[in-house]
Image: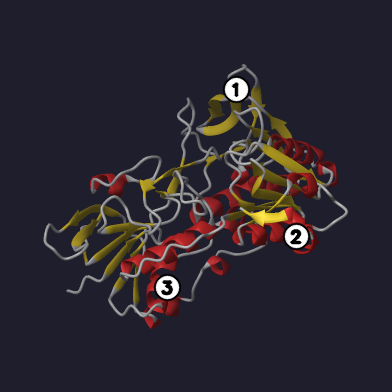
Amino acid sequence: MAGGTLIVGASQAGLQLAVSLRQWGDTEPITLVGEEVHPPYQRPPLSKAFLAGDTDAESLAFRTPSYYADTGIQLVNGERITEVTLSPSGRPGSGAATTATGRALPFDRLALTVGAAPRRLAVPGSDLDGICYLRDRDDAAVLRARLAAASRIVVVGGGFIGLEAAAVARAAGKDVTVVEAADRLISRVVAPVVSEFYRRAHARRGVRVLLSAAVAGFDGTSGRVRAVRLTDASVLPADLVLVAVGVLPRTELAEQLGLECEQGIVVDGYARTSNPRVWAAGDCTVQPHPVTGEGRVRLESVQNAVAQASVAAAALLGRPAPTRTVPWFWSYQGDLKLQIAGLSTGYDEYVVRGEPDSERFSVLYYRQGELLAIDAVNNPGDYMAVRKALTQGATVRPGLAGDLGTPLKSLLAARQDAVGSA
């Protein structure tokens, strides 16, 4: 039986890897295996449009059912790979995988696109009914159904998923409280001024935000959650709880194969793992900075999954070609549309364009005068200008970035004295 390429994980990255292989002329068998019973689908709408009931499950699918057969991609749904072995023989990547049901899947080339799993809270009462997590389509369907019947919602975690879900719940007229253990919202990603903007903006919409607040446990009756207890002894009544405290990369199979893992599967700029016979892409990986090539970063985004999977496909075909890619992200929290380009990690200065309370502003991040990233709230023009500048390796001096009277696009194009190589 021909092995071809086995892609473990029917994620955005997994599907993109398979599609890229076919687009670039690969005619070998491709098997794409996913744990979920659903064909590959979009995840970002789960905490936004899907949760709000503005779109249905079928519209989330990336491809029509016939696409896979038409392109010769064998899609295996509802199967979990539990064991992978690599042949000691000379064939690059040859080996076999075994599913939980005992199904054997031989391969010549192996790619891991296994994604990440929600971080769980290990506190008393965490097994009560009504405590939900949001990672996959089934999670979102359960949460949407329960949200319709609930009145008091507690969201544990003030990151993007938590705030997006809180915005949906509040727009539906629910009583919503967000509990965040850190001293500000989205603290891992944005500057304090952006964190404070989101706190104030959600509060204006009627969401109660508690900072520096840790969960001690959950209380319930008849096996169902009724309250959230905090470490300061306060109690928050709740008939529905969403826990959104981050994710953990799925590294089980990588560790089984002896691959290097450090907060994710370590890959190089070609998406190769520490074993050059295995590739990996998507949320499960840590990789060199996509612009500078320095250090290691873990990126959780559609853009990164697509870009890294494309690089992996090229490497699998023996023509590795890493590209300089500017990361970009988005988070739509009701009518608050945040767009991010670049990585602000390591910034030593930032410039605010506009007034945050107007709910249309941007924050540009710098290190030693070099433009690193932008956070743009309801400001797509600034976002696109900075994304283009970063892609071209350009920058603009911090002293000019705050000039709200001049569009950034015009500034970058017309003020050549302000633009230099990054």
The residue lying toward the viewer, choosing from 393 and 15, is 393
Separation of residues labelled 3 and 2 (CA atoms): 41 Å
Relative vertical location of residue 236 with respect to residue 84 in this rendering, above or below: above
Q: Earlier in the sequence, mark 3 or mark 2?
A: 3
Quarter holding the N terminus? bottom left
Type of amino acid under label 3: Val
Q: Residue 302 carries which label?
A: none
Amino acid type of the residue tagged 1 in the rendering: Leu
Residue 247 placed where, x, y %? Answer: 48, 42
The residue singled out by tag 1 in the image is 230
Is residue 227 positioned above or below 259 on the image? above
- Give the numbered dot on residue 416: 2
**Residue contact between numbered discs 3 and 2, judged by CB atoms under 8 Å:** no
Q: What element carries label 3?
A: helix
Residue 177 position, x and y percent, is 69, 34
Residue 19 image label: 3
Instruction: Point out the frontmost of discs 1 and 3.
Output: 3
* Residue drawn where x is 48% and y is 76% of the image: 64
Outermost residue, left side: 89
Label 2 crowd bin: few (<14), some (14–19), many (20+), radius 10 Å: few
**Residue farthest toward the bottom in the current orientation of the protein:** 70
Circles 1 and 2: CB atoms closer than 8 Å: no
Residue occupying image coordinates x 14% and y 59%? 87
Residue 179 falls in image quadrant: top right
> Neighbour class for label 1 at 10 Å: few (<14), some, many (≥20)?
some
